[in-house]
Amino acid sequence: MSTVDGRGPLRDVWDHRALLRRMIKRDIRGRYQGSIFGTLWSFATPLLLLCAYWFFLGVVLQARFGSAPQAAFPVILFSGLITHLFFAEVIGRSSGLIFEHATYVKKVVFPLTVLPWMTLATAAFHLCVNLSILLVGQLLIVGSVPPTWPLIIVVLLPALPLLLGLSWLLSAFAVFLRDTQQVVPLVLTLMMFASPIFFPMEMVPEQYRPFLYLNPTTVIIQQVRAVAIHGQMPDFLTLAIYSVVALLVMSLGYWTFMRTRKGFADVL
């Protein structure tokens, strides 16, 4: 059983930062191992997706997103989708995280609490790639980007502790409740459709909007679009509330993981 962590979320990652860097590099490279183009696929896939949105939805169908200019539809849709994919990658991998690294649980002393950090960092790498595609696509399709675009970093920061907390929770639950691995993909699909990826919030009847705000991606998607597409300042009050909830989830997740990890080896 691991005895080299448990000093706190930030202390654990700092104490094992060199190990974590190696794990992140190996995790990213492992995703594309054996392919001819390697990590270039991380750029090619979102680029082709954005091109498909631009041509089929923007040019052929002339789709619109609320009152936004028609030309902006592909980048509006893409910005929402890549935000969801960031959440989905972390949450989706978390349910199998301990099983994926079962050797570390059974045979060696290993800081298990850094595994969600690795998953988050890999997802953040893919998000950065997707954001670069969004930026270039926005320049080419729309013709300009607002001066508030760099604030997208501020908007995304509150999601990090939330995702860490969810990763600790899900990875721990999945060890003892195997059905978690079957439920998580269904929940992620529901999260995708119950968020303003494909439609503006204004289209949702007012009495149903609170339910959409239970989706952790809703606020972040809206704020990403506000700063990156519409040139608006972030809603700092909303982000502050989101951050408080995220920190509580992170604390709960870490506490749960630390209390349950003693039984991982017995179950696995």
Image: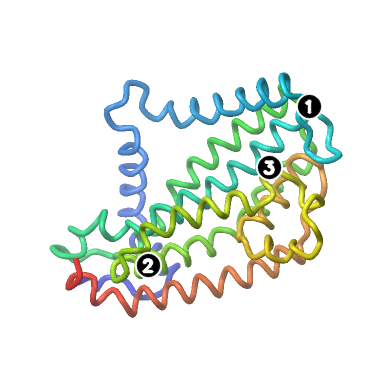
Find the distance from the CA under tag 2 to the CA under tag 3.
39 Å
Q: Which mark is residue 71?
A: 1
Number of labelled discs? 3
Find the distance from the CA under tag 2 to the CA under tag 1.
46 Å
Q: Residues within 10 Å of mark 1 (few under 14, many from 20)?
A: some
Front-lying residue, 74 or 233:
74
Dot 2 or dot 1, earlier in sequence = 2
Dot 3 or dot 1, earlier in sequence = 1
Image quadrant occupied by the C terminus: bottom left
Amino acid type for the residue under numbered disc 2: Asp
| SS class, disc 1 | helix
**Residue at the image point whose x is 57% and y is 48% from the top:** 84
Q: Residues within 10 Å of mark 2 (few under 14, many from 20)?
A: some
Picture coordinates of residue 171 (x, y %)?
36, 64
Of circles 2 and 1, the one toward us is 1
Picture coordinates of residue 4 (x, y %)?
26, 70
| SS class, disc 2 | helix
Residue extending furthest toward the bottom: 259
Of circles 3 and 1, the one toward us is 3
Kindly indicate the quadrant of the structure image that contains residue 248. Answer: bottom right
Q: Which residue is mark 3?
A: 198
Amino acid type for the residue under numbered disc 3: Phe
Kindly indicate the quadrant of the structure image that contains residue 237. Answer: bottom right
Q: Are marks 3 and 1 in contact (CB under 8 Å)?
A: no
Front-lying residue, 75 or 134:
75
Kindly indicate the quadrant of the structure image that contains residue 77. Answer: top right
Picture coordinates of residue 118 (x, y %)?
38, 53
Q: Which mark is residue 12?
A: 2
Q: Are marks 2 and 1 in contact (CB under 8 Å)?
A: no
